[in-house]
């Protein structure tokens, strides 16, 4: 996930212009990168309880940029954070789908990796293991 924090940093690094008396430009770049990485790490670890990651990161780094560039910085942060949030959501859904696997085991004793049939516990290869209710023959005669 670090490619997201790097993408934020690369898109805003040339805009960094701190007040010279307080901090050097190199130190400001390091702090901006560390903030970007910290935000992405928190987003990965705790996506449900990180209400506004774009705003949070922007508030943390905005004083390293001149006022004339802050709208541009926020747009860059918001765009990349939006992509990261979507990727994390997809990864969480994929992890939940892994829980939805066939209940059978293979000949080697490993769990079957196939997806079960709709509303069933077994995949097409193992559907013969499914308990079936006996059907009534000739009930409407």
Image (spheres, grey):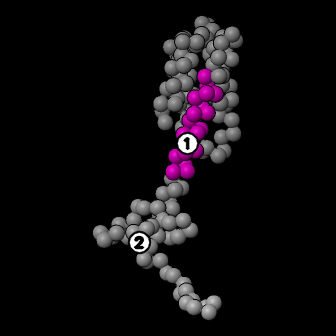
Give the label on residue 52, or none: none
Q: Which residues are magenta?
A: 76-94
Q: Which residue is mark 1?
A: 88
Q: Is residue 23 above or below residue 2?
A: above
How crowded is the residue under tag 2: few (<14 C-alpha within 10 Å), some, or many (20+)?
A: some
**Residue 81 included in the magenta stretch of the image:** yes
Residue at 46% in and 70% down: 122
In this view, which residue lies farthest toward the top? 20
* Residue 11 drawn at (x, y percent): 54, 19
Residue at 54% in and 12% down: 14
How crowded is the residue under tag 1: few (<14 C-alpha within 10 Å), some, or many (20+)?
A: some
**SS of the residue under disc 2:** helix
Residue at 61% in and 22% down: 76
**Residue 17 included in the magenta stretch of the image:** no
Q: Which residue is mark 2?
A: 126
Q: Is residue 130 above or below residue 80?
A: below
Q: Is residue 131 above or below residue 68?
A: below
Front position in the image: 134 or 53: 134
Residue 129 at least partly seen:
yes
Residue at 51% in and 20% down: 10
Task: Please count the marks in the image.
Answer: 2
Q: Which is more N-terminal, label 1 or label 2?
A: 1
Q: Quadrant of residue 110?
A: bottom left
Residue 23 at least partly seen:
no
Front position in the image: 122 or 49: 122
**SS of the residue under disc 1:** helix
* Residue 86 drawn at (x, y percent): 58, 39
* Residue 37 drawn at (x, y percent): 53, 31
Magenta: main secondary structure: helix
């Amino acid at each position: 996930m670090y490619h997201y924090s790097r993408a934020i940093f690369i898109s805003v690094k040339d805009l960094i212009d701190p007040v010279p008396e307080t901090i050097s430009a190199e130190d400001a770049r390091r702090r901006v990168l560390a903030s970007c990485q910290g935000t992405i790490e928190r987003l990965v670890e705790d996506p449900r309880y990180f209400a506004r990651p774009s705003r949070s990161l922007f508030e943390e780094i905005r004083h390293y940029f001149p006022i004339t560039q802050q709208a541009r910085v926020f747009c860059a942060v918001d765009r990349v954070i939006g992509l990261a949030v979507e990727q994390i959501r997809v990864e969480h859904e994929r992890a939940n789908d892994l829980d939805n696997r066939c209940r059978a085991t293979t000949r080697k004793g490993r769990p079957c990796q196939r997806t079960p049939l709709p509303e069933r516990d077994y995949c097409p290869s193992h559907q013969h293991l499914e308990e079936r209710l006996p059907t009534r023959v000739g009930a409407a005669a």
